[in-house]
Image (cartoon, rainbow, N blue to C red):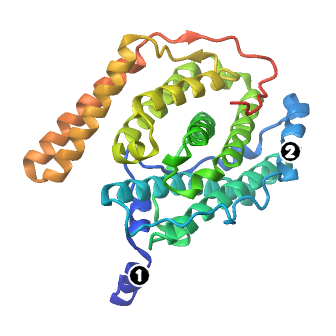
Amino acid sequence: MNMQTDIAKSDKLNAATEAALETTLLNPRFYTTDFDELDAIDVSSVRPAWDKLVGEMRADPRKGHFKKNEDWDEVDWDGMEPELKKELIDFLISSLTAEFSGCVLYKEMRRRGANKDICELFGLMSRDEARHAGFINDALRESGIAVNLGFLTKEKKYTYFRPKFIYYATYLSEKIGYARYITIFRHLEKHPEHRIHPIFKWFKEWCNDEFSHGEAFALLMKTDPKLTQGRNIYWIKFFLVAVFSTMWVRDHARQRFHDALGIDIDEYDHKVLNLTSEISQQVFPIALDMKNPRWDRGLRSMNKAFQDMDKAKKRGGVMGAIGKMRAGTRALLTFINLYTIPSKKVECPEDPRLEPVW
């Protein structure tokens, strides 16, 4: 790479873009998959529910919602307490990256595919996620930074997942996103004095987009019963444990942010995970036993392992590398412990469709 290219790249790589580019166990990732396999999906077995859902999305009930209006309060970024500002920006960047990840994946499916049903669905979901990401980026600009989305698309590492893993991971991501957003929105309805940023006023309609996207993936899984049977149940459990424990660790890294919202992190995370578990029983034939004493102990152990991993990374050198390896081993053993908690069997309904009533 020549000097001129280096300079051009550095101009695009501001702090927000650099944070979004980072790929770790906890950061949102960009995905790619077998698009030919996706294109071969036959939705005829779920046609009535499919047409109803796609029709609702096509009607675009939240068109025009993701724009600032008179409800958008001015944020005193300069006067904000530094640790809160850091964690709020981290929350916004992480949320933007997750939203834009979906946009990129869905847009690529629409571009590559020939299946009318699948291409229309993914085009509609890409539209929604693009709005979400752009809205968050507008909020970030007020703090003096913004993510270069074009640069992010080209430079961020992509993780390959087979389509069924995309279904499990993205379904949970969309549903847990709904549970997180609606829980925060309902809390701030009761305690508006804790609304540290106006973007939270937009969360009710926002989370309904997340909910409908999760409904789409539930129907995609219903097109092939094998996806939720046999050995695939082990994969479903893997993603349940991975997504739930990742949320716990990520949230506990933002203590000041949650304090400012007036939220007890433990109570909030338990509520979100229980709600997500309840919703996921529309299509997953198992549920995690989160009342088992090993569950809470495991989540706390996982959080401690990641805290120690972060400390070791900052320490650097040989001792830092050893500390990071030891903490990583503890995290792996903790994950295995969480995974081996006996799960509960679930009788899934014939019609998986739900409404966002929480």
Q: Is residue 280 above or below residue 136?
A: above
* Amino acid type, callout 1: Asp
Q: Which quadrant is the C terminus positioned in? A: top right
Q: Are marks 1 and 2 in contact (CB under 8 Å)?
A: no
Percent position of residue 223, x then y = 78, 30
Q: Is residue 229 above or below residue 53?
A: above
Q: Residue at x 64, y 25 (%)?
A: 280
- Cα–Cα span, label 1 and label 2: 41 Å
Q: Disc 1 marks which residue?
A: 11
Q: Disc 2 marks which residue?
A: 56
Query: Seen in the image, is 216 located left or right of residue 235?
Result: right
Q: Is residue 256 above or below residue 295?
A: below
Check disc 1 and report its element: helix, strand or loop. helix
Query: Seen in the image, is 139 located left or right of residue 21?
Result: right
Q: Residue at x 73, y 22 (%)?
A: 225
Closer to us: 192 or 348: 192
Percent position of residue 173, x then y = 57, 39
Check disc 2 and report its element: helix, strand or loop. helix
Note whether residue 55 is visible. yes
Note whether residue 112 is visible. no
Quarter of the figure with residue 67: bottom right
Query: Seen in the image, is 228 located left or right of residue 238?
Result: right
Q: In the rendered structure, which disc, 1 or 2, sits on the residue that comes first in sequence?
A: 1
Closer to us: 254 or 350: 254
